[in-house]
């Protein structure tokens, strides 16, 4: 059996020279660059791992065919081909947005630049903080989603704006007499992409009954994407942020501004900063649950 296997490998066209090795190294470097730049630590990471498994199965099917195990090889290759075609249909919206991103004039500038636009981020945070201050004071309900890298934001469902972010625009959108005030606003960088967006609600059975639809939508969106969701309660005016399915309530704007600077600056900073924000959210959320349990027991 071992002799036949070696003979089959010798008969196959697997010879490699120095040029082939250089080509393989270049391809590997390009894939590694795109993985670290656009995919690592995002929800798309699991999808890419699945693609690599399909590639491995396709290579394995070719090996089976070369070893004259034609039935197994053709069967495995047919399954891989069917799954690949299904992925193209299922992820058609994401592929369309990704191709549109590749077609941007400044794509290479965005891809190879390592320094953030600090002035733009400071303006965004200032406008958001001013908006939150007015919305919280007037008890106006609001839900703002800060789009993450390659995350599915459901922006196609809402009304597309593609407008510069400003306090006046945010306050106008969430005014009770406007048609878009019930949905969420999608923010990417310094742009408001769309408004009136419907988000998926969380299905967590342990979530407290005191959270309404906006809070459940914020938590649900953070569960299915790498986006951060800022929500303002219409009843109490409380301000909260949801990330990775964890909700944190803020008592002052200074702490909110500090966390927003870390969240919106995660593309430029180390991933550890984002993890620290999420860890803080988890700690605060756990304390809130403990306090809620104590309050309920005291009432009883």
Image (cartoon, rainbow, N blue to C red):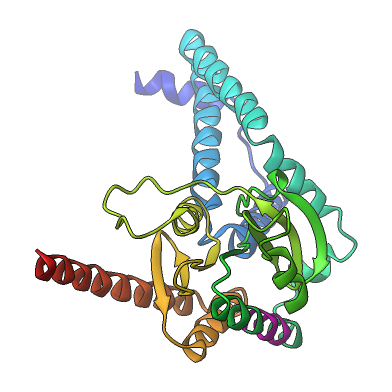
Q: Position of residue 42 (x, y in %)?
A: 53, 58
Q: Position of residue 2 (x, y in %)?
A: 36, 23
Front residue of 36 and 299: 299
* In the displayed structure image, the side of residue 148 where residue 105 appears, left or right: right
Asked if 6 appears above or below 53 in the picture, the reply is above
Name the residue: 74% across, 68% down. 172
Out of 215 and 70, give the one closest to the viewer: 215
Instruction: Read off the magenta span.
Output: 122-129
Q: Residue furthest right?
A: 105
| Residue 113 image-quadrant placement | bottom right
In the rendered image, residue 56, in percent from the top left (x then y), is placed at 51, 35
Say whether residue 127 is magenta: yes
Can you say which quadrant of the picture contains the N terminus?
top left
**300 is higher (above) or lower (below) than 128:** above
Q: What residue lies at 37% left-to-right and 73% top-to-bottom?
A: 281
Q: Is residue 24 magenta?
A: no
Q: How many marks?
A: 0
């Amino acid at each position: 059996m071992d002799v036949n296997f070696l003979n089959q490998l010798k008969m196959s066209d697997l010879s490699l020279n120095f040029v082939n090795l250089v080509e393989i190294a270049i391809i590997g470097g390009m894939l590694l660059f795109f993985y670290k730049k656009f995919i690592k630590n995002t929800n798309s990471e699991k999808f890419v791992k699945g693609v690599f498994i399909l590639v491995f199965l396709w290579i394995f099917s070719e090996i089976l065919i070369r070893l004259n195990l034609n039935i197994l090889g053709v069967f495995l290759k047919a399954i891989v081909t069917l799954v690949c075609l299904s992925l193209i249909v299922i992820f058609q919206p994401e592929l369309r947005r990704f191709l549109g991103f590749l077609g941007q004039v400044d794509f290479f500038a965005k891809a190879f630049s390592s320094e953030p636009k600090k002035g733009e981020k400071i303006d965004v945070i200032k406008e958001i903080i001013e908006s939150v201050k007015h919305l919280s004071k007037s008890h106006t309900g609001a839900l703002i989603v800060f789009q993450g890298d390659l995350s599915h934001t459901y922006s196609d469902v809402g009304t597309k704006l593609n407008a510069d972010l400003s306090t006046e625009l945010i306050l106008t959108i969430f005014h009770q007499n406007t048609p878009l005030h019930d949905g969420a606003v999608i923010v990417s960088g310094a742009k408001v992409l769309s408004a009136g967006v419907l988000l998926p609600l969380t299905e967590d059975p342990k979530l407290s009954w005191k959270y309404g639809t906006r809070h459940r939508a914020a938590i649900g969106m953070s569960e299915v994407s790498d986006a951060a969701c800022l929500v303002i309660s219409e009843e109490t005016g409380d301000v909260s942020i949801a990330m990775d399915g964890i909700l944190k309530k803020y008592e002052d704007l200074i702490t909110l501004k500090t966390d927003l600077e870390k969240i919106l600056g995660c593309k430029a900073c180390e991933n550890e900063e984002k993890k620290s924000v999420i860890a803080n959210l988890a700690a605060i959320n756990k304390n809130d649950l403990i306090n809620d349990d104590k309050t309920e027991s005291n009432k009883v």
